[in-house]
Image (tube, grey):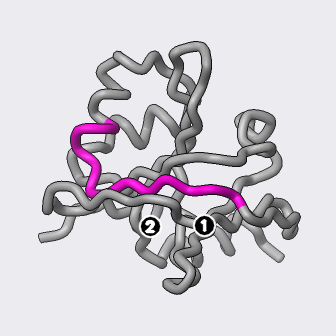
Amino acid sequence: MNISRYKKVLSKYATGISVVVKKDKKNLVTGITVNSFVSISLKPAYISWSLDKTTSSFKKFKNLKIFNIYILSEKQIEVSNYFSSKNEVKKNSVIAKNLLKYNLAELNCKIIKKMNIGDHLFFVAKVIKFKLKKDQKPLIYFASKYKKLF
């Protein structure tokens, strides 16, 4: 299979962008940008996302138990780019403040199952709490580029 062509095919599916964040005892926010976030059940409230086993951040997230997911708004391209390439930032930094201030929603989750599937680790988690934020436009990813709704 031609992997680069396959990736191009998959890029034609528009997705929202979210950041998975774990708490850190060193006053750091450790996060990773994901577009694999999906709701899988309403009763109970279960979500899932997956992590590439070859990513540099795999070791930081493979033993994840409790985490937050922030669904990004169109104002958060810088946040998405930051957590796509780096994982940690001080809690009082501009990036961390923008993550918290401009997101569309946040979910506090607890892992209930992890599965190795192909080249990814697949997480299933129960939503413990959630917060709906300001009504803004989402950050969309399509054809390997950020897009904005009209």
Q: Secondary structure at mark 2?
A: loop
Crowd class of label 1 (few under 14; some 14 to 19; many from 20; radius 10 Å) = many
How far from the left and from the top, in percent, is residue 58? Answer: 77, 41
Q: Which residue is denoted by mark 1 in the rendering?
A: 126
The residues colored magenta run 99-111
Task: Give the residue at x 73% y 64%.
Answer: 112
Let me know if residue 146 appears in the view.
no
The residue located at (84%, 61%) in the rendering is 119
Mark closer to the chain start, 2 or 1? 1
- Identity, as a three-letter code, of the amino acid under mark 1: Lys
Give x and y (percent) for residue 148.
22, 62
Tell me the element at label 1.
Answer: strand
Which quarter shows the C terminus?
bottom left
| Foreground residue among 77 and 59 | 59
Residue 32: give its label. Answer: none
State left or right for residue 42 relative to residue 59: left
Q: Measuring 33% from the left and 53% from the top, which residue is drawn there? A: 72
Front in this rendered view, residue 72 or 41? 41
Q: Which quadrant holds residue 102? A: top left
**Residue designated by label 2:** 143
Query: Does the magenta run of residues contain 117?
Result: no
* Image position of 111 (left or right of 74): right
